Image (cartoon, helix red, strand yellow):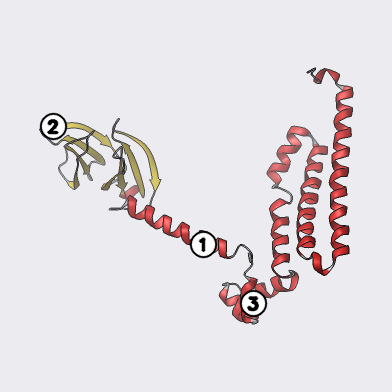
Amino acid sequence: MNKYLLLLTLFVSSSFADTLYITLEKDNALAVVNGSNGQLIKTVPLGQRPRGLALSKDETLLYVAASDDDTIQILDLETLNIVGDLPAGEDPETFSIAAKFSEALTITKANLIDAAQNMGDPLGLRTLDATNNLEDAASDQEVSHALFGTLVKYFDGKIGAFSYLLFILLYVPCVAAIAAVKRETGTRWALFSIFWSLYLAYSMATSFYQIATFSSHPIQSLIWVGFFIAGFIGIWLILRQMGQKLLDINPANTTNA
């Protein structure tokens, strides 16, 4: 066995008392040694140039940094087999799972707080309200003056921005999804899925806008919302009628209760 060792770590637990886990950098392996008598239990093949080690909190997994492979390998201490890999930065040597987890929690918390604070202002138009200066608002949002000016020009404030986001969220899915619908159900249903997605997206976005601005034009808002409700009822009746025709043509597909 090559004796060039990078790191010698002793883990003491109820299950693996006095067991040594030794990275063999030149051999690309991990030596598992009985700490009481010095006997080799097993040599586990690893990635290129293994270095730092870290034990999981429940002491069931051992994380090993494979420096030249830019990964963290996961060793099951019960079976002494590699059970997975985690991507790492370039040339990982020593690391701390707990520290990285804590950092991830901190970042996640900050992102959630930021998302909650901007829930009512997804495009950052609040900044423009506060400063009343387009250049300052664009700089605060880290976008170009022209882009921010376009947003302000074409969206009716925060409500208009939310309506736009609703439309983008619901409108026609990707080409691959449409192709899958066409392949499974035919061209007619693929075209219907495109129509339905566009109608759903436009009706939801417009209804949201009309309801949110109801006090400014109540009659207009009622007409728009009523129109879309009537449209949904009409689509439901057409689909129901088509379904009944299919049942009449293929009565064998029906089942008796």
Residue 120 image position (x, y, % from top left)? 64, 64
Which label sits in the foreground, 2 or 3?
Answer: 3
Viewer-proximal residue among 143 and 225 = 225
Quarter that holds the N terminus: top left
Q: Which residue is mark 1?
A: 113
Corner quadrant of residue 127: bottom right
Question: Which numbered circle lies on residue 128?
Answer: 3
- Residue drawn where x is 21% and y is 43% of the image: 24
Label 2 SS? loop
Residue 67 image position (x, y, % from top left)? 31, 50
Could you tell me the amino acid type at mark 1?
A: Ile
In terms of sequence position, does the residue under pointer 1 or pointer 2 come before the other? 2
Could you tell me the amino acid type at mark 2?
A: Gln
Label 1 SS? helix
Could you tell me the amino acid type at mark 3?
A: Leu
Residue 84 image position (x, y, % from top left)? 38, 39
In terms of sequence position, does the residue under pointer 1 or pointer 3 come before the other? 1
Q: Which residue is mark 2?
A: 39
Residue 74's place in the image compared with 148, above or below, is: above
Q: Residues within 10 Å of mark 3 (few under 14, many from 20)?
A: some
